[in-house]
Image (cartoon, rainbow, N blue to C red):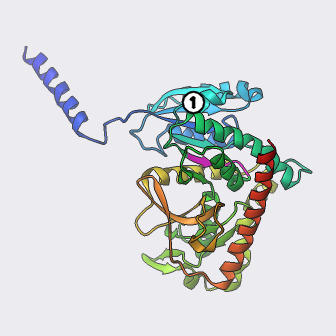
């Protein structure tokens, strides 16, 4: 009797501890959609989602994987691998080529899939192909997804694709849509860290302004770096104005092309890491005294950027809501760069609206 009692007592105590300890309490599963799920970016991304790196070690997931019909066989293999990882947090994996299945009741949409730019394709052709895709996906979000869904657009041209999706989902707040410029943000941090021979974790508050394209402006005017335990201005530590206004900017702007030239494939590992950083910050917020770069809807007031563009700004995030970092002084050099990339985005927007009107 005593042995049986001790066993039952220990079990009840463990149950009591589990109920009281938030670190062991499991939440209800969230539904996370990844499009372009058979592609190489998703192949890196899905592992990080499944193992709890993004939403936390106590957040169960239902992963919904969407791709085009010809990729469904490949997607079957991806599902097998997800199963074989034996993730404790992964409650279900749904693979589909149907938007009405993919977008149903989702909490988070990570829109990776898009029409890639092919050899000889003009940017206008690329925009036309993607307007069709993101109009359809925006309409599916509007019809099937939760109204508080967080939408992250990765597929290029990411800013204008994001605007197209947002315009096609009028019942979902525009502030719930963002596009990925975190890869550029991370590239900028890495270049500064390399130059100063510190960890990338020691560099914060770089800014990517504008479009995820070669017109983007990586700005370190307000960036900080920790050197020997002391937080300093990046400009004061680098001490090379010509590098910061020249090679540094072009290296970040052209990094994607450099990766393609070297490995004959586009950035996948670093893009996946950036998506994880972006979504994790939406979910848990930014650190004290830290801001990040994110493509979000412009209001016409912040930094004199025209209204109704998805433009990369410095933001802080709290309670799953972002807000602009206001009041940063902008010098003439930065102003010219910021306006140049805004002009490109305004032109892309007009082209996209033309295509939307003709559909």
Of residue 285 and residue 225, the one placed in the foreground of this image is 285
Of residue 169 and residue 250, the one placed in the foreground of this image is 169
Residue drawn 60% across the image and 45% down it: 170
Could you say where residue 255 lies in the image, as x and y percent from the top left?
A: 73, 62
Q: Is residue 248 visible?
A: no
Residue drawn 78% across the image and 62% down it: 347
Can you say which quadrant of the picture contains the C terminus?
A: top right
Say above or below: 279 vs 333: above
Could you say where residue 274 lies in the image, as x and y percent from the top left?
A: 59, 53
Q: Is residue 22 visible?
A: yes
Residue drawn 62% across the image and 70% down it: 194
Give the magenta part as a residue range: 151-156
Could you say where residue 256 lies in the image, as x and y percent from the top left?
A: 74, 58
Residues packed near mark 1 inside 10 Å, few (<14), some (14 to 19) or many (20 plus): some
Say above or below: 231 vs 101: below
Q: Which residue lies furthest to the front in this view?
A: 357
Q: Residue furthest top?
A: 1
Element on which disc 1 rests: helix
Any magenta on residue 152?
yes
Please indicate whether residue 299 sits to the left or right of residue 265 in the image.
left
Please indicate whether residue 199 sits to the left or right of residue 16 in the image.
right
Any magenta on residue 218?
no
Say above or below: 128 vs 188: above
Could you say where residue 323 lies in the image, as x and y percent from the top left?
A: 49, 63
Q: Which residue lies furthest to the left in this view?
A: 2
- Residue matched to label 1: 82
Q: Residue furthest right?
A: 120
Can you say which quadrant of the picture contains the N terminus?
A: top left
Of residue 26 and residue 316, the one placed in the foreground of this image is 316
């Amino acid at each position: 009797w005593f042995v049986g009692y001790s066993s039952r007592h220990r079990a009840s105590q463990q149950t009591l501890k589990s109920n009281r300890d938030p670190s062991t309490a499991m939440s209800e599963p969230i539904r996370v959609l990844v499009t372009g799920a058979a592609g190489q970016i998703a192949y890196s991304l899905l592992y990080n989602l499944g193992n709890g790196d993004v939403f936390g070690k106590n957040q169960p997931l239902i992963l919904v994987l969407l791709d085009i019909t010809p990729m469904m066989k490949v997607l079957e293999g991806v599902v097998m691998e997800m199963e074989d990882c034996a993730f404790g947090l992964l409650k279900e994996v749904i693979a589909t080529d149907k938007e009405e299945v993919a977008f149903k009741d989702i909490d988070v949409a990570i829109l990776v899939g898009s029409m890639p730019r092919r050899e000889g394709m003009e940017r206008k052709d690329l925009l036309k192909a993607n307007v069709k895709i993101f109009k359809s996906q925006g309409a599916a979000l509007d019809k099937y997804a939760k109204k508080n869904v967080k939408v992250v657009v990765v597929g290029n041209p990411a800013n204008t694709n994001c605007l197209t999706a947002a315009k096609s989902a009028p019942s979902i707040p525009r502030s719930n849509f963002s596009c990925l410029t975190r890869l550029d943000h991370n590239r900028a941090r890495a270049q500064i860290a390399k130059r100063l021979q510190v960890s990338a974790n020691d560099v914060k508050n770089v800014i990517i302004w504008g479009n995820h394209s070669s017109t983007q402006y990586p700005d370190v005017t307000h960036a900080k770096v920790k050197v020997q335990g002391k937080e300093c201005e990046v400009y004061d530590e680098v001490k090379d104005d010509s590098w910061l206004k020249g090679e540094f900017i072009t290296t970040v702007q052209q990094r994607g092309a450099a990766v393609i030239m070297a490995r004959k494939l586009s950035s996948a590992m670093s893009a996946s890491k950036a998506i994880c950083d972006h979504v994790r910050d939406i979910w848990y917020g930014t650190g004290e005294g830290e801001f990040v770069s994110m493509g979000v809807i412009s209001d016409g007031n912040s930094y004199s950027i025209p209204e109704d563009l998805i433009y990369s700004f410095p933001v802080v995030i709290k309670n799953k809501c972002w807000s602009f970092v206001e009041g940063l002084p902008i010098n003439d050099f930065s102003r010219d760069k910021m306006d140049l990339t805004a002009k490109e985005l305004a032109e892309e927007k007009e082209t996209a609206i033309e295509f939307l009107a003709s559909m």
